[in-house]
Image (cartoon, rainbow, N blue to C red):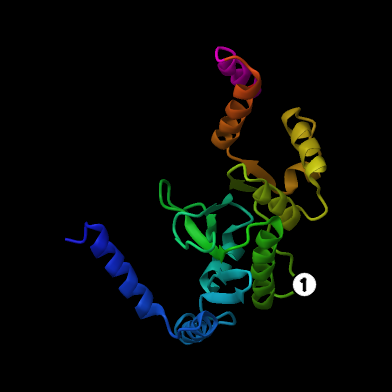
Amino acid sequence: VGSSRSVIRKISSEGNVKLRRDDDLEKSLRQLKSEQTEKLFPGEQITGYLQEISIDPLRLICFTAGGIAAYHKFASTIPLSWDATGGIIVNRKKRIFYYELTMSSLDKGGSSLPIAVMLSASHGTMDIIHWMNCFIEKYKQVYGYTNPFPKPPVIHSDRALVFLLAGIQVFNGDETMDRYIERCWRIIQRVATKRDLEITVVHSCLGHFMKNVKVNASKVLGKKQVSFGMWLMAL
């Protein structure tokens, strides 16, 4: 029961109809946002879950007062990670990605804890920065504009350039990619300054990095040389 495609499509369709508040997308989303405001964290300064709605480009920014509180308490001491996937939302007209900022589990081996989410049909660095700026603005409303926004010691991502650039700009202020690479070099050479170790390390997944190395090595090296090239890069 429920294993055939037709049944799954019917369940999905019924779920969409149940959540839809109006045939007009914007009206439906704003009504849903209003309902959430009354039900989720109604006594907090930041209410609801859906915090910002944009129709063109389509972008929904979502988080709760609980996510802000968790970030405030733990973000400066434990690693964060963010990622995006296009496999959750299927839309034949638009390429909609699900973005998620997560915090490592407080329990060893436990699941990561979502802090903030974005659904977006636009996928540039500035879209991610806008998402984070929205979160920062709400954080400031709760904890005050004079208090510094907590910066994680490390933020993990795959090798997507948009995450690397956004992480540098959001968490490290005036740092550029060139300055970041120079800082990484000082760290691995053990000549890092105090500031080098204080600001956020924007970490790129080694698995994604080595996959990219293999793809590029295969273009210029012989088949038997690719493994050697990857070994050299791993050093």
Picture mark count: 1
Element type at marker 1? loop
| Residue drawn at x 59%, y 29% as measured from the top left | 215
Give coordinates of residue 196: x percent, y percent.
77, 42
Near-viewer residue (223 or 185): 223
Left or right relative to 13: residue 229 = right
Q: Amino acid at mark 1?
A: Thr
Name of the residue lying farthest toward the front = 93
| Residue drawn at x 81%, y 41% as measured from the top left | 178
Q: Is residue 54 above or below residue 97?
A: below
Give coordinates of residue 219: x percent, y percent.
63, 24
Give coordinates of residue 189: x percent, y percent.
76, 27
For mark 1, does the 10 Å Cα neighbourhood hold few (<14), some (14 to 19), or many (20 or more) residues?
Answer: few
- Say whether residue 231 is magenta: yes
Q: Give the position of the N terminus as an image quadrant.
A: bottom left
- Magenta range is 223-234
Residue under circle 1? 146
Q: Is residue 16 above or below residue 186?
A: below
Q: Let me know if residue 158 appears in the view.
A: yes
| Residue drawn at x 65%, y 71% as measured from the top left | 139
Image quarter of residue 185: top right
| Residue drawn at x 80%, y 31% as measured from the top left | 191
Give coordinates of residue 65: x percent, y percent.
54, 74
Examine the residues drawn in magenta and state their main secondary structure. helix
Q: Give the position of the C terminus as an image quadrant.
A: top right
Name of the residue lying farthest toward the left = 1
Q: Let me know if residue 153 appears in the view.
A: no
- Say whether residue 173 is magenta: no
Name of the residue lying farthest toward the top = 224
Left or right relative to 112: residue 101 = right
